[in-house]
């Protein structure tokens, strides 16, 4: 299959399977297992401190025969908005009181950092095979440094306009992120969620519009889904949700329980937990406030406000205030080895 051969050659892997980078629920272990099985393991770097990133990259570097993808966010860092935060805290106050918390409390949490010069320096030192970006691309000077490092560059698009913009910037392949995908939408040219379409509509449209290979993402959970994506012109697939129950993932107990329950059949886009639309399992907070709120602080500031509620509830075994990221298709989400899952996904290509 021509597409299969082109993406494996481009990325230097045996199988056209990319493990989606999933910040907060994985580290190097998952990436190592996927790459060892012949796919492309990914390390999400946006929530790692420089010290943690270096430690994880040193672990990957111990397997020089394997290839990996390092993933970064490219959002604009917002200025704090005290009035908006105050209104959001007031809206959440009843929940703080219910859990015996001070509504003005804050909690330390992982900061979602945009790609910067320090991260570029890490790439120049470790020279990963692939670098991927979410929410667009870094500025031209930083992007030039990534190109100069020798890495292949891929990035997420959720519309034809975004895909054409990425291609014009010189990416090596585009990830077609369909509406079904779990976690944060990669949208960056518009904040209008009505522009978002399903994978099987977006994928062929991007294949027709672009000269570079297209990687399908969203709603693909098993070998049949992979085959369907290839039938529509995909050169590779990116899979995330199916890996969440693998032992190499760091998915928390509350999140794992939700994924294995009937609740996982109901997901929605929400900005309550981070300030940016992301797909997760509908929980109490999403039901009672509505999944999208204009009061939520801009990404990523909303996460700091919600952190005390999340921590207190999870200590009680509850996911009422947790971002339970999950795609619409959990059929392939099983507690099996990530390497085995990777090989199963590629059985029909």
Image: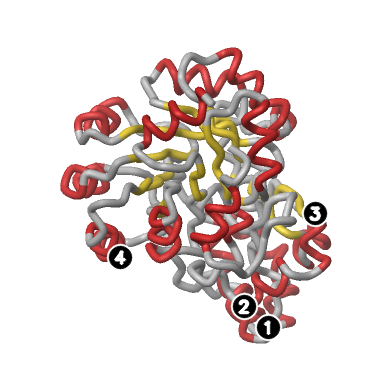
* Residue 338 image offset from top left, x and y in percent: 52, 62
Q: Secondary structure at mark 1?
A: loop
Quadrant of the rendered structure where residue 204 is?
top right
Residue 331 can be seen, yes or no: yes
Labels 3, 4: front one: 4
* Residue 96 image offset from top left, x and y in percent: 68, 76
Q: Which mark is residue 52?
A: 4
Q: Which residue is mark 2?
A: 253
What is the C-alpha distance between the residues marked 4 and 2? 23 Å
| Lower position in the chain sequence, tag 3 or tag 4 | 4
What is the C-alpha distance between the residues marked 1 and 4? 27 Å
Labels 3, 2: front one: 2
Q: Nearer the viewer, residue 311 or 24?
A: 24
Q: Which residue is mark 1?
A: 317
- Count residues near mark 1 (Cα–Cα under 10 Å), then give few for <14, some for 14-19, many for 20+: few
Marks 2,1: beta carbons within 8 A: yes
What is the C-alpha distance between the residues marked 1 and 3? 23 Å
Q: Which mark is residue 158?
A: none
Q: Is residue 309 above or below residue 88?
A: below
Q: Which residue is mark 3?
A: 290
Marks 3,4: beta carbons within 8 A: no
**Horizontally, is 271 left or right of 41 in the view?**
right
The residue under the point 58% across, 55% down is 274
Residue 84 can be seen, yes or no: no
């Amino acid at each position: 299959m021509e597409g299969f051969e082109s993406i494996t050659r481009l990325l230097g892997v045996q199988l056209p399977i990319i493990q989606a980078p999933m910040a907060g629920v994985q580290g190097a272990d998952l990436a190592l297992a996927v790459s060892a099985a012949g796919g492309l393991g990914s390390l999400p770097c946006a929530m790692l401190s420089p010290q943690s990133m270096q430690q994880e990259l040193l672990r990957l570097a111990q397997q020089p025969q394997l290839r990996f993808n390092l993933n970064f966010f490219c959002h604009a860092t917002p200025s704090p908005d005290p009035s908006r935060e105050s209104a959001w805290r007031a809206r959440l106050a009843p929940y703080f009181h219910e859990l015996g918390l001070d509504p003005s409390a804050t909690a330390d949490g992982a900061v979602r950092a945009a790609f910067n010069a320090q991260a570029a320096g890490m790439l120049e030192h470790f020279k990963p095979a692939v670098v991927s970006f979410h929410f667009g691309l870094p500025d031209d000077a930083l992007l030039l440094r990534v190109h100069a490092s020798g890495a292949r560059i891929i990035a997420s698009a959720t519309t034809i306009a975004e895909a054409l913009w990425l291609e014009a910037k010189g990416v090596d392949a585009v990830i077609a992120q369909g509406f079904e995908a779990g976690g944060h939408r990669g949208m960056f040219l518009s904040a209008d969620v009505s522009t978002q379409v399903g994978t099987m509509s977006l994928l062929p449209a991007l294949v027709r519009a672009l000269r570079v290979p297209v990687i399908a993402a969203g709603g693909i959970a098993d070998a049949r889904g992979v085959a369907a994506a290839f039938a529509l012109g995909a050169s590779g697939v990116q899979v995330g949700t199916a890996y969440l129950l693998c032992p190499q993932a760091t998915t928390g107990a509350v999140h794992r329980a939700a994924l294995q329950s009937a609740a996982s059949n109901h997901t929605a886009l929400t900005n309550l937990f981070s300030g940016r639309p992301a797909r997760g399992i509908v929980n109490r907070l999403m039901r009672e406030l509505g999944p999208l709120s204009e009061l939520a602080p801009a990404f990523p500031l909303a996460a700091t406000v919600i952190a005390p509620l999340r921590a207190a509830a999870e200590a009680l075994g509850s996911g009422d205030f947790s971002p339970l990221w999950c795609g619409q298709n959990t059929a392939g989400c099983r507690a099996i080895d990530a390497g085995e899952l990777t090989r199963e996904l590629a059985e029909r290509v």
